[in-house]
Image: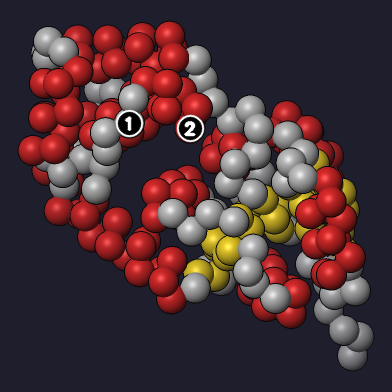
Amino acid sequence: MSDPSPPTVVIVDDHELFRAGVKAEIAARVAVLGEAGSVADAITLIRQRQPDVVLLDVHVPDGGGLEIIRTIGAELPGVRFLALSVSDAPEDVIDLIRAGARGYVTKTITAAELVAAIERVAGGEVVLSPTLAGFVLDAFAGRERGSSAGREVEGLTRREVEVLELIARGYLYKEIAHRLGISAKTVESHVSSVLRKLNLSNRHQLARWAAQRRIGE
């Protein structure tokens, strides 16, 4: 019986030397189909090559790993995403997993561990280190506690909910714009729309409303 084909991978990171290093470390065990250094290039490449796994950094320019997952996830459900990032910040881990990533590992991982993580994600498993898994479990437990707000936000668009969650966590407009890859003016427009739909007067009322319903936890 022949050995199964190795998983196919696309590497997405804005640092060319890092991409080259990762490729050199894993190429003997997986089939690297290509590399990209920006959101737009990554989306084009993934559509063209349709790999088993996309190995992506959280903070890719022009929208980040979140934008790639949101754009490609529904369009190509067979493509799985494994975040490989220097960041182990809880909000980064939680945001990527909520968006649909099947795993999250940090750049301290060894080459052998990374190959194993890629193989597991390609096979349908979820891969998280124990610490990162704790972040995710805590976040989803918090979301269950806050589910009573569900009906109240049904009238909001997905982007408005994202903005609302970040407002609830205390982010400024400029910070929200950076995280979502949109302009501060667009953030302001979304906030105005949310205020109107929830019948609130200002951002402070909105933050208090969200905190009372444990949104963003």
Instruction: Give the class, few, some or many, for how many residues have Cα within 10 Å of label 2's Cα (few <14, many ≥20).
Output: some
Badge 1 amino acid: Tyr
Closer-to-camera residue (81/17): 17
Can residue 75 be seen from the camera position used here? no
Q: Please tell me which residue is depicted at 51% across the width and 20% down the height of the picture.
A: 182
- In the picture provided, is 206 more to the left or to the right than 184? left
Tell me the number on the disc at residue 171. Answer: 1
Point out residue 153 in the picture as x, y percentages from the top left corner.
22, 29
Closer-to-camera residue (99/185): 185
Q: Are marks 1 and 2 in contact (CB under 8 Å)?
A: yes
User: What colouring method underlies this structural image?
Assistant: secondary structure
Can residue 48 be seen from the camera position used here? yes
Instruction: Give the class, few, some or many, for how many residues have Cα within 10 Å of label 1's Cα (few <14, many ≥20).
Output: some
Distance from disc 1 to disc 2, alpha carbons, whole Å, reads 10 Å
- Work out which quarter of the rendered image holds the N terminus and state it: bottom right
Closer-to-camera residue (9/150): 9
Q: Please tell me which residue is depicted at 58% across the width and 46% down the height of the picture.
A: 58
Quarter of the figure with residue 52? bottom right
Q: Please tell me which residue is depicted at 77% across the width and 45% down the height of the picture.
A: 15
Is residue 166 shown above or below 117?
above
Badge 2 amino acid: Arg
Tag 2's secondary structure?
Answer: helix
Point out residue 90 in the picture as x, y percentages from the top left corner.
39, 55
Tag 1's secondary structure?
Answer: loop
Which residue matches tag 2?
A: 179
Return the disc, 1 or 2, that comes first in the chain's sequence.
Answer: 1
Q: Please tell me which residue is depicted at 87% across the width and 84% down the height of the picture.
A: 3
